Amino acid sequence: MDTTKDGKWLLATTKTYIVLLPTFSGAKNGYTHGLGKEKAIPKKLRLSIDDCRKYGVKEVRFTPAKFNDSQDGKEKFIVTSTGDLILTWRLIDVIRGNLLKYEVNSVISSQKILRM
């Protein structure tokens, strides 16, 4: 698990997908108060079936996802890997619902693509 410095977002990694959870609803803090029906729907990140085929991924096994800071110290990216692939999502894209817009880097071939 990982969290943003301000505590507003939480990442949880499973074997085949990553979940981005907002921890606040309005002024309510999910760490100290139950959000109940007010809680937002988590964002589920995964490697697309097309990319699994393209990169020959037989089984997805994500490493623990982490927030990656930019030069200004704010979290801008979510980064994980599976096999020889490194996947990077822009946090703002995920928040906006663009869950399949990510960058794939292959450690072996240094190949890079950007999903739109």
Image (spheres, rainbow, N blue to C red):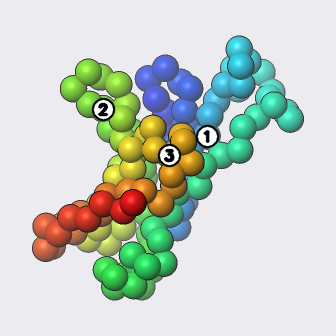
Cα separation between marks 2 and 3: 16 Å
The relative height of residue 100 versus residue 54 in the rendered view (above or below) is: above
Whole-percent x and y of residue 33?
A: 77, 21
Q: Helix, strand or loop at disc 3?
A: helix
Cα separation between marks 3 and 1: 11 Å
For disc 1, the neighbor class at 10 Å (few under 14, some 14 to 19, many from 20) is some
Which kind of residue does numbered mark 2 sit on?
A: Asp
Circle 2/circle 1 CB separation < 8 Å: no
Where is residue 109, by image quadrant?
bottom left
Which kind of residue does numbered mark 1 sit on?
A: Leu
For disc 3, the neighbor class at 10 Å (few under 14, some 14 to 19, many from 20) is some
Q: Which badge, 2 or 1, is on the more N-terminal residue?
A: 1
**Residue identified by numbered label 2:** 69
Whole-percent x and y of residue 91?
A: 43, 40
Judged left or right of residue 85, residue 100 is: right
Q: Residue at x 39, y 75 (%)?
A: 51
Q: Can residue 95 be seen from the camera position used here?
A: yes
Q: Helix, strand or loop at disc 1?
A: strand
**Residue identified by numbered label 3:** 94
Where is residue 58, by image quadrant?
bottom left
The relative height of residue 105 versus residue 68 in the rendered view (above or below) is: below
Q: Residue at x 39, y 50 (%)?
A: 89
For disc 2, the neighbor class at 10 Å (few under 14, some 14 to 19, many from 20) is some
Q: Which residue ends up furthest to the front in the rendered image?
A: 116
**Residue identified by numbered label 1:** 21
Quadrant where the C terminus is found in the figure: bottom left
Q: Which badge, 2 or 3, is on the more N-terminal residue?
A: 2
